[in-house]
């Protein structure tokens, strides 16, 4: 006959895969509670732990009484609930119970749980006890499988969205490259036109120097030299800008040379808009990739603990879930199965 100790050890020896899918909110709450506990002194911590231990003792005592009084519940469901409660009782740190009454209550409760389980075991028989041990992890496995499939589908959806955004990013990059090329062509054209105007002004200054020869040789020489220097610089700038402008496509050059002032402004606006669009898409793509990495890590943890899950299709998962659910319903009854699932979720939050 399987003992209560063996079943509690079996219940505690879960692979822990279902804990992979627990929400992080419980962790943050636990961290806040730990911080609050650390803030008080040792005496208050000890008193707090003692109150929690006493509360757990009374809670487990109340649960045992309710199970004993629940005559309508099947022996199988009562035995299963006894195992869950006995597991919590074993996890209680008896060293916190300094008072004799508390220690006696703890020892008495262990005996009562053992006695209640032994009585139920006689009613269930060997075959039912084996079924009980076989189905002990079914609730958490069903819960985990459901979350596993949900995350796997979410991962597929994110991958599809990532592919769509990657395509949009490529299109945005192409648009940005075109806008940048058009802007560079405009810049080269404007520099060329500016160099032309500068050269014309420099030529005018040089001619002015020649005119001033009749007035003053020194002034004419200074103005002439200045005009000549400006003319050389203007011509060099004109040449460099012309070479840069000539490197662009003929169609683009014709388009740019026909622009008026609003056309030049539109090119700058197009470049700015294309850059903002590209950066926005890249940020969104990185966010999706971050979500994907988190999902892949979670799914990887699950498949590391349950290696048989990785190659399973959604249909195979559904069939396995249905099989385990039916086994629970047949053995515990439908109300009993619902109670086990509810209790399992409650245990997950502890």
Image (cartoon, rainbow, N blue to C red):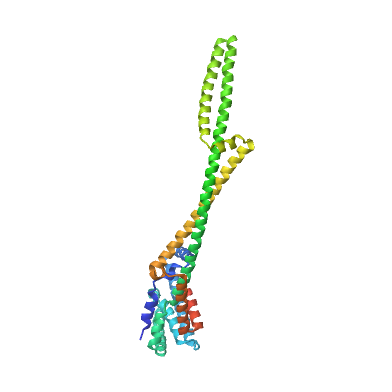
The N terminus, quarter of image: bottom left
Asked whether residue 265 appears in the rendered view, the answer is: yes
Relative side of 5 to 232, left or right: left
- Tell me which residue sits at (36%, 83%) in the image: 3
Estimate the x, y position of residue 52 in percent, counting from the top left: 45, 73
- Tell me which residue sits at (43%, 62%) in the image: 297
- Tell me which residue sits at (52%, 51%) in the image: 169
Task: Reply above or below: 141 against 183.
Answer: below
Q: Nearer the viewer, residue 61 or 285?
A: 285
Task: Reply above or below: 57 against 41.
Answer: below
Q: Residue furthest front?
A: 250
The image quadrant of residue 105 is bottom left
- Tell me which residue sits at (47%, 59%) in the image: 292
Q: Nearer the viewer, residue 196 or 252?
A: 252
Task: Reply above or below: 54 against 23.
Answer: below
Estimate the x, y position of residue 19 in percent, counting from the top left: 43, 69
């Amino acid at each position: 006959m399987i003992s209560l100790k063996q079943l509690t050890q079996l219940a505690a020896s879960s692979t822990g895969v279902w804990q992979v899918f627990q929400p992080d909110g419980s962790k943050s709450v636990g961290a806040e509670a730990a911080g609050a506990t650390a803030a008080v002194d040792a005496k208050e911590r000890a008193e707090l732990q003692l109150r929690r231990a006493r509360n757990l003792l009374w809670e487990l005592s109340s649960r045992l009484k309710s199970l004993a009084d629940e005559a309508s519940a099947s022996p199988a469901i009562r035995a299963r609930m006894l195992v869950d409660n006995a597991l919590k009782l074993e996890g209680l740190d008896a060293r916190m119970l300094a008072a004799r009454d508390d220690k006696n209550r703890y020892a008495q409760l262990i005996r009562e749980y053992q006695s209640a389980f032994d009585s139920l075991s006689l009613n269930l028989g060997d075959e039912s006890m084996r079924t009980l041990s076989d189905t002990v992890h079914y609730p958490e496995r069903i819960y985990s499988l459901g979350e596993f499939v949900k995350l796997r589908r979410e991962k597929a959806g994110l991958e599809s969205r990532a592919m769509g955004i990657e395509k949009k990013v490529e299109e945005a990059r192409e648009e940005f490259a075109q806008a940048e090329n058009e802007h560079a062509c405009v810049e080269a054209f404007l520099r060329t036109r500016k160099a032309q105007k500068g050269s014309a002004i420099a030529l005018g200054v040089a001619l002015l120097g020649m005119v001033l020869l009749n007035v003053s040789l020194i002034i004419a020489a200074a103005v002439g030299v200045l005009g000549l220097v400006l003319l050389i610089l203007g011509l060099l700038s004109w040449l460099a800008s012309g070479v840069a402008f000539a490197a662009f496509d003929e169609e683009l050059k014709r388009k740019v040379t026909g622009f008026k002032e609003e056309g030049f402004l539109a090119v700058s606006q197009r470049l700015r808009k294309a850059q903002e669009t590209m950066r926005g898409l890249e940020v969104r793509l990185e966010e999706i990739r971050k979500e994907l990495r988190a999902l892949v890590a979670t799914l990887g943890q699950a498949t590391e603990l349950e290696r048989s899950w990785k190659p399973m299709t959604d249909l195979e998962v559904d069939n396995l879930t249905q099989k385990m659910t039916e086994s629970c319903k047949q053995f515990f009854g439908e109300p009993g199965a619902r109670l086990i699932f509810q209790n399992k979720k409650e245990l997950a939050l502890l």
